[in-house]
Amino acid sequence: MSTKTKVIIDTDVDFDDYMAMVYLLQNPDIEVIAISITGCGAAHLSHGVNNVANLLTLFGEEALSTPILKGSPAPLRYSNVFPGSVRTDADCHYDAVFPGTNPSPNIVDAQDWLTRYFLETQDTVTVLSIGGGTNFGILFSSAKTNVRLQEGIKRGIDKIVMMGGNLLPEYIAPGAKGNIMATLGNNAYYNNDVAEWNIFIDPLGAQIVFESGIPIELIALNATNDVPIDQSFVDKLNAINTPQAKFVSQILAFPANAAGIGSFLSFWDPLAACTLADPTLVTTQSFNVSIYQELDEEKDQSGKLIVDDNGSAIDIAISASKDAVYAEYLRVISLPSAI
Ligand SMILES: [Ca+2]
């Protein structure tokens, strides 16, 4: 019997989602059994689906038929969106060149596939959530009226490792501010300075995931702030000759990404992926948290993580070791391809 950890990735196909997906697909200890796509984050849904289909051509024959689950084109609450330029750059996969066009992508409806899978499987999977809570929020909502599905999900998912959220300075020292306005810069069409994007995009989807009763490890900005993407990482990555490393190098070389090296880019989603494989890379602390749901355009706090006695108990990553994360990422991406 395989001892690999089975993983379902849920992604919005942003630049750092490629870093996370490549790391897990390349990792001999991991078996990626499906990749679900949300249309609520960086890439628009159809572009995200096609880009992930073609990304699989980096990983040999067997990977080509990995189920690609076409998820939701809309969040469960509000219609918060990334800047248009971020979405356009994600749609065009940062001009990185896929080795080929996937000749027979296995594209299916996300809710159909996930429902059937968790009704039938005897396996246990870990979910890597790197695109917000919408797809799994929808699944967990339908399970509320389907006892068999609810039991299948409880039995079938051992843990959700979710990139998202931030514990503000009012809850922990030094704390982490939100990242909405930092991303928007001079084009601040939201005035929310307390939330993180994956939660902000769909506060209700994330809240439903939190309340699922499944163990959750939240890779918060408090930890990802400890792992910026700096030039020393890029130099080491660029020196690796595997096709996978070369692909990630291209992603980071795209001008809008290159501009953030050593400044505003962090190991967001790849820290979640690395932590899934090696939990010792972060320090966690358990908090009871809920997500602020009200929208007030005058002073928006929607998506804020609130520490609250009545909230769900979540293990939150509050710090990380940059050197150990870099070493683990570069170790795996240097490995020869599995054929
Ligand atoms: Ca993402």
Image: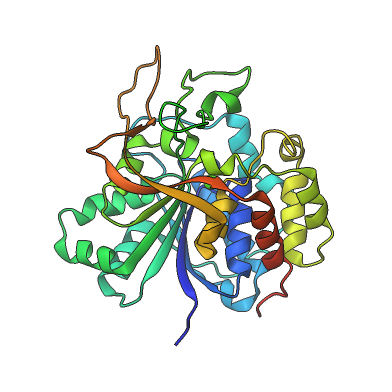
The front one of 10 and 157 is 157
Q: Total marks drawn?
A: 0
Between 326 and 189, which is closer to the camera in this rendering?
A: 326
Q: In which quarter of the image is the N terminus?
A: bottom left
Q: Residue 158: image x %, image y %?
A: 35, 65
Asked if residue 240 can be seen in this view, the reply is yes
Residue 280: image x %, image y %? Answer: 53, 60
Figure quadrant of residue 335: bottom right
Q: Residue at x 25, y 70 (%)?
A: 119
Say if 204 sits above or below 103 in the image.
above
Q: Would residue 323 be found to the left or right of residue 184 on screen?
A: right
Q: Nearer the viewer, residue 218 or 196?
A: 218
Image: 40 above or below 275:
above
Q: For this rendering, which residue is in front, 174 or 128? A: 174
Q: Is residue 54 visible?
A: no
Q: Which quadrant would the C terminus be assigned to in this image? A: bottom right
What colouring style does the render use? Answer: rainbow
The residue under the point 38% across, 58% down is 110
Q: Which residue is drawn at 56% across and 70% down?
A: 104
